[in-house]
Image: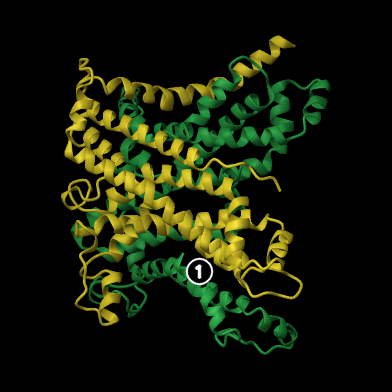
Chain colours: A yellow, B green
Amino acid sequence: MQHGKYRFIVGFLAAPLALYALFVIWPFIQSIYYSFTDWTGLSPEFGMVGFDNYSRMLDDEIFWKSLQHSLTFAVVLPLVTVGLALFFAFMLNVGGRRRRGAAIAGVRGSSFYKIVYFFPQVLSIAIVALLFQFAYNPNSGAINSVLKGIGLGSVQPDWLGDPDLALICVMVVLVWSTVGFFVVLFSAGMASIPRDFYEAALLDGANRFTTFFKITLPLLWDTVQSGWIYMGILALGAESFAVVQIMTVGPNGGGPDYSTIVMPLYVYQKAFRDGQAAYATTIGVALLLVTLAFAAVVMKLGRRERLEF
Amino acid sequence: MKTTDTATTGVEDNPGSPAGPGPTLGKTTEAAPAKRSRGDGTVLNVFSHGMLIVWAVMVVMPLLWAVMTSFKTDRAIFTSPWSLPDKLHFENWSRAWTEAHMSDYFLNTILVVGGSLLGTLLFGSMAAYVLARFDFPGNRFIYFLFIGGMSFPIILALVPLFYVMQNIALLNTLHGLILVYIAYSLPFTVFFLTAFFRTLPTSVAEAAFVDGASHTRTFFQVMLPMAKPGLISVGIFNFLGQWNQYLLPTVLNTEPERKVLSQGLVQLAVSQGYKGDWSGLFAGLVMAMLPVLAAYIVFQRQVVAGLTAGAVK
């Protein structure tokens, strides 16, 4: 019996664990090891160089730029996205005209809005990025021709080609594509808050905005916090890579004068364009540290007593 | 913050808010006195509807614009981006499908996602079941090993992974990509399904076991069917993630004829840019967009449940 149990456990875990170890765990460990070598990726030979890559990184201007942009993403994107999503979700659930017998009501057609808002979430970030690349086109793009149409023909920004605007343009796209997911997520959370909480608060003379900060937000806190971390990881990782690599100009992306370079893209460029695999893993390790620090800070700042209801 | 101020002062200024939409149906006359005495319902209602509509338009416009553009000639795309097409140029679509290799990209994507989705669900549920239901030394360790993969930046592992794949001759192959997709989908799948298997009653499995079914048979014939709702949720989640995957194939699958949809489109944007065939590119974009959107609209409830399930837990 015992024997059979262990054979079963090993049999069931072997394949998934082997796959996971070979393609995920092992490369992670290797990349930390490689960051202390001078491996180019082009030849199998390499030697240990200690912390050389790390000191080189600290002197690398483009690395600092990418760090700065990634940190901006990690701070600004969750703030804007989660903020907008909370606002829309609250409007959907509580913004409606009062009906008889109900203290609060969602707006009419709230399920329609939720369906539409979710559209970008099911599309590939690559498709979204390509679409907006055309919308931003300074000569024939959708945005500038709208500006022309409403009599702002003199305001024709270069958008992605303008080093001062490019980063903001990229962030707008990430916000556009993620807000809907959080609206739906928060909306589900809000719907599970008992109605009589609102009734009691409104009876005591609270307006809707007080109820948002005193009832909705505290009771939704866990969801907001995990949404915040989720968005931050997304803004630091694969999503920002795709958007910047596809949308912005320059060799392999990165924008004019590296004005939009982000850490994952810089890792990619160093490893697969410049043949500096070891240095690329060093930047990757820095990105790992930034990601873990971000999650730790959000958890620490967001710690509250859990409210049961 | 600012918006809250304007809305509240708006209430004080004009309590009877004329801005409110006034459908004169029999029902509303009943509610009217209550509404007037608590005018903030109406002002807020108008305000929130306004904001919600603005965002809905912002979401839909780019998509409609893409659909419209895919039917226009190149000339019209550049001279008047917002005008309607003079006629529906379906030849853009057929050009994208054949000449621009959209058909190949679709086929590759279907093969890769089909294989990896099946593998992810099978391996994910096997590992999750064992971790959720059996006590053995190292259980917690393996569980956290899987979970840890959710928050690590994938790009860090991709640099060595590229060379690992090269050494075992899996680089630029579809089956190699399938294995990588499965491996990178396991953290969330195991996390989600472990929680799901824990919620299932133990008595059924015990009864099957007492009746002489082996552990393996209990799993496949009793537990998996019971876990169907969880498998559907996590299946939809993984399907969308793998169908839309861009980073992994960009690094690990660069052979032009083996490209999957997302990277194929980016490739198309570069090459059609040289050829000046923008209408073909837009047709390709819309072609890739519509099936997913259509599937979402049909299976709307399941998709939303699948994608938000993980975050709520």
Dot 1, how many residues are within 10 Å of its Cα: few (below 14), some (14-19), or many (20+)? few
Three-letter code, disc 1: Thr
Q: Is residue A24 above or below residue B264?
A: above
Residue at 63%, 32% in the rendered image: B194
Q: Residue at x 21, y 32 (%)?
A: A58
Taking the image as drawn, is residue A259 in sight? yes
The N terminus of chain A appears in which quarter of the rendering?
top right
In the image, taking residue B110 as reference, residue B211 lies left or right, namely right
Q: Is residue B92 left or right of residue A123?
A: left
Q: Number of labelled discs?
A: 1
Q: Residue at x 31, y 39 (%)?
A: A264
Where A240 sits versus A51, above or below? Answer: below
> Residue A128's x, y, as percent?
37, 57
Query: According to the image, label 1 marks what residue?
Result: B4
Q: Position of residue B258 (x, y in %)?
A: 34, 41
Give residue B91's position: percent from left, percent from top: 33, 68
Which residue does the image show at 38% across and 46% down from the upper left?
A74
The residue lying toward the viewer, choosing from A55 and A213, is: A213
Expressed as whole percent of the image width and height from the top left, the position of residue B72 reads: 31, 73
Residue A41 in view:
no
Q: Nearer the viewer, residue A134 or A165?
A: A165
Q: Is residue B163 above or below residue B192?
A: above
Q: Chain of mark 1?
A: B
Image quadrant assignment for residue B2: bottom left
